[in-house]
Amino acid sequence: MSVSEPTLETVRAYLLAQANSALRRPGMHGGEIAVRLYLDAVAVACGTEQAWAADMDNLRERGGSNGVGVTGALATVLGNGTEDAMASVYADLAYSRNWLHLDHRLPADDYDAMRDGIAATCRTGASWSHLRERFGEPSILFGGTNPHYPKTLGYASDRPQDPLICFHLWNDFGIHPEPVLVAVRRAHPSAAFRDAFTFASVGRP
């Protein structure tokens, strides 16, 4: 019995699924190298290699990637380059290309209230449970659900043009009962990478 060749759409769907799995749990897939390879492959399958390369060039020019990748750039901004935070930076770019699979989107009014309250949230501080109680479950979770380790909560608006709002949470085994807010990031394609962050007053490693 002959076996039919997979269609381009089948290959594209497979690569998108793998890329999204790597973005959500980068540590289980090989870290930044795996995330980058999957997204590069998605770009090929979608016929957008040049546009994706331009996205990566833009990220480097804005300071979002250096000689050791996005992880290195995050280390200069946050003091560490956790895999969840790294994945969320790549997810910003994937989101802008409609590659990111979300669990849900926030109504525009809720997103606006979250965006407008970033400074206040960072000033007062927040924990993982506090953020979920206030804003609901994230549109996408980067990192696992184990409370002993860092994670990033990404929230998307039902207006596709709005960037993700990412809450970077830090913990280490035995330090806090659950992850605490380090910074909030709302990316802009023409702004310096560091300028996308609003830092929390407590919780930094």
Image (spheres, rainbow, N blue to C red):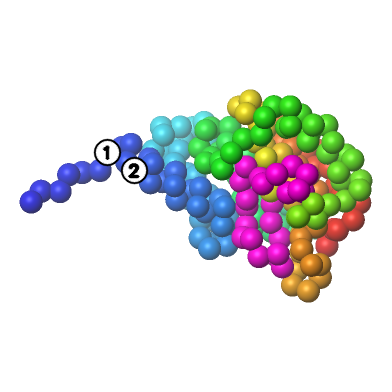
- Residue at 90% across / 56% down in the picture? 202
Residue stretch in magenta: 131-152
- Horizontal and vertical percent for residue 91? 60, 43
Closer-to-camera residue (190/103): 103
Find the distance from the CA under tag 2 to the CA under tag 1: 6 Å
Disc 1 residue type? Thr
Looking at the picture, does residue 146 appear above or below residue 159? below
Q: Which residue is mark 2?
A: 11
Residue beneath disc 1: 7
> Where's residue 165, x and y in %?
71, 39
Along the horizontal axis of the image, is 160 left or right of 180?
left
x 27%, y 38%: residue: 7
> Which residue is located at x 50 percent, y 37 percent?
99
Q: Check whether the beta carbons of the residues at disc 2 and disc 1 lie within 8 A of each other.
A: yes
- Would you say residue 110 is visible in this rendering? yes
- Does the magenta run of residues contain 140? yes
- Amino acid, disc 2: Val
